Every structure is written in C-alpha cells, then in structure tokens.
Image (cartoon, rainbow, N blue to C red):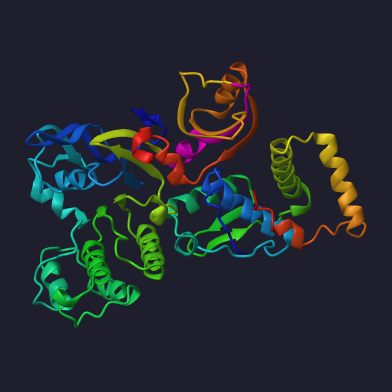
Amino acid sequence: MLVNLDLHDARPLYLQIMDAVRRALVVGTLRAEDPLPSVRELAAELLINPRTVSQAYRELEREGVIYVRRGLGTFVAPDIHPDRHERRALARGVARRALVEARNNGLGVEELVTMIREVAAAEGGEPSPLPTPAIRDEEQ
Amino acid sequence: MIRESDSEHGGAAAVTTHHLTKRYGTDTALDAVDLLVPEGAVYVLIGGNGAGKSTTLKVLMNLERPSSGTAEVFGLDTALRGPEVRAQVGYVPERHNPGYGWMTGGRLLQHIASYYPSWDDAYADHLIRGLDLRASRRVGSLSKGETRRLQLVMALAHRPPLLLLDEPTDGLDPVVRKRTLALLAEHLADTPTTVLITTHHLYEVESLADHVGVLSNGRLIAQMPRDDLQRTVRRYRIEVPDGWEAPSDLRIASERRSRTGREIQCIVVGEERAITERLTLAGARVHEVSSLALEDAALAFLPAEATR
C-alpha cells in the first residue's frame, strides 16, 4: 500500500490516510491479514506528525478494518469484505468530489450522470472497475 | 484574536504565555501574546520579519525577560526557573553561529553532551549520518546549511521533551530539508516531544504542523489546530450585480475582480455554509468554493497591507 497525501486538500490528513487504506483494500493491493506500515515508518515517509498516523489507525481499528497485535504491528482484519462497505464508502467519496466539480462548473446532477454514461460508452463500453481508475481519484 | 476551543485537546499545555509583552525602548516586539502549545503538538508559529517569532522563543529560553506578562514551559515560569526550563529544551537559535568556531563539530557535540545527562551518543551518531554531516570539520568553516544541521543534532540528541526550533530549515537545500523532516517525524515517534517551530515559510514544514499560530507586529492574531484552519478559510468565486459591494461584516482577506466587475474571487474567513448564505443574501451567486493550502489559509488572517 502506498499513501499519497494532498496537502492542498482541506480534508484532515488522518482522513486521507484512512481513505488510502480503504482504497488499497478495494483495489486489492492490501488484503486480509496483510501488515500495515508502522506508525513511525509511515510518519517518516509522509513527513507528518506520528500522532496523525496513530489517529488514522485508531479510527480504522474502531471500524474493524485493522487490528493491532501487541508487539507485532498492525494488520488488516481477517474478515474484511472490501466489496461491500468499503466499496460504498469509496464510491460515495468519488461521487461527492464529482458533484462538487459539476456544481463549480454550473452543471446539474442529471447532466453529470448522463454525461458519465455517454463518455463511458464512447470510450469503449462498460468501464472496468479495477484497478487503474479507482486509484487516481485525488485530483481536485 | 481568533482561537480554537482549547477543551478539544483537554491535555496539558507544554508552553503557555499570558499577556506576554516585550518592549525594546519604544518598540513593542511582543504585544500581550497568549500562546498555547498543547503537549505533543507540532506547533508552527508564522509571521513576517520582525513579527516577534524569535523574541517569543528567546523569552521561553529566558534569553530575554518579558517587559510584562509571563511565560511558562511545563508549568515553570521561564523568568524564575530559567536553568530548569533550558534543561528540558532543545533549541535551534535564529543565528547560524554556535560559537566555538575553532572546535571541530564532533568536539563541540562532546562539549554540549557533557551538559545533558540524557545525551544519547549513539543517537547523535545516527543524526550526524542521517544529516550527512562531517564531524571532523571545524565549526567555523561550516556553511550556513551545515551549521543548521549541527545545531539540529545539538537540539535533538539529548531527547528533550520540548524542541524550540527557530527557522530550522533555513539554509537547507530541499533534499536535506526533507531528510530533516523525516528524522523529526521518527524522533517524535520514538520520543514524546512537543515542538514549537517558527518560520516565515509555512510550506517548508507544512506537512508536520498540526497547530498553527500567526504573529503580526508582535500580536498573535490567530492560533488553532491545522484542521480548523483549513476548514475555516475558503476561496469563493462569485458572480455579482454591477456595482456590488461586499457586506462589511465579512472578513475578506484578498479579492480579485474580473474586468467587467461581475466576477469576484475572494478568500473569506468563516464557516463555509454561513459565508455562502451571507454572500447569497447580499445578492451574490456563489459559483465555486475551494480550499487553500495551509500557508494561504494562515495568511488570510494577516491584515491586508501585510500580504500585498
């Protein structure tokens, strides 16, 4: 799993880390029982306060996405079903960003939905859900 | 002053000042500053030249005495308990001159180490390697950036509970700056530490910051957690009728108008929903609301003349 933070995004950094973990689960780069980077490693990699990483991990643990094995590290929960809850959470995020973008351009919901289908059809039928388009959703 | 709800953090404060004022003759360097740095925070204090950043740190180190008001570090009054306070602080001063120019870097570190029972030799070596320092060179022959790195080793290697870093990235090239921030992140993971950083380039340390304070002409005009800062400052693109004037009760930080005057882009301090309502009520159509980089959000608090 690789985490990218967008410092221009007003979403708190710990939420961005949580999203990155969810995304990795949906895309499949992170699977049940996989180890996560330690708080220290991830903080040094992202150049952020370790407490921010701890906060993200704590929230994910509370949601049952990951768990801590004392002295061994942090791991993805064994019974994780990214196809349900996590997929919906991710899709909701993508939809929300698309809506903001549409509104900023003076477009309505129906216009947006119709155009997504048209563009998808023009670009070769059913868009494949995995994995490339799902990863790159950080653009404003 | 705009400030956060302190209760959110609940925990103890590592640094507090109460109406801290410092005058030099008729010059007011600090004007009734109420600083609050929660324990464990990475607090970045920004402001232009002469805003009072360095003076604040010097008072905390008891290198300057307050004209009035008080400063406390871990509950100790800095003016009365200076030596006890300094024993708990790693300080990188504004000036790139640690003195002892005739000593080698390594010798100077040994000298400094003798003052601190908690000095960690192995860790000092680790930092020297991480920061790519050559300990055999004489301090007087070091470049600005090398001196900075040596000062960082001096501040970190005794693992003090508080770091006061005055422009720590000044003189560092981008590669070394990144490595320094990574070492700091690791340091924070290994050692419970509160950090107070001053800079006039917030973007240089932006990723580490979780609290931000803004000093302007000796006054602390805002201090809040990073997330609050980014939430309460937004850029709005609005369409307005001819001759429209912004409501006077809005805190508008910067404004750009299109040639026709019908389109305005402005940065406004306040909750997005309330600001949008207020603008709409005043006859504007809000087209776009976007968030800002942390530095731009912080600059929105400075008086207009300071940002131009």
The image quadrant where one finds the N terminus of chain B is: top left
Q: Is residue B195 visible?
A: no
Residue A117: percent from left, percent from top: 89, 47
Horizontal side of B129 relative to A93 (left or right) equals left
Residue that appears at 51% across and 65% down: A72
Residue A131 higher or lower than B207, as above or below = below
Residue that appears at 25% across and 41% down: B51
Judge whether residue B231 is colored magenta: yes
Magenta residues, start to end: B226-242
Q: Is residue B295 visible?
A: yes
The image quadrant where one finds the C terminus of chain B is: top left
Q: Quadrant of residue B67?
A: top left
Q: Residue furthest front?
A: B259
Residue A55: percent from left, percent from top: 50, 48
* Front residue (pair B22, B186): B22
Horizontal side of B303 relative to B150 (left or right) equals right
Judge whether residue B230 is colored magenta: yes
Residue B111: percent from left, percent from top: 10, 71
Number of marks in picture:
0
Q: Residue furthest bottom?
A: B136
Q: Quadrant of residue B55?
A: top left
Residue B183 higher or lower than A65, as above or below = below
Residue that appears at 14% across and 74% down: B140
Residue A31 higher or lower than A67, as above or below = below
* Front residue (pair B142, B132): B142
Residue that appears at 29% across and 61% down: B170
* Front residue (pair B178, B76): B178
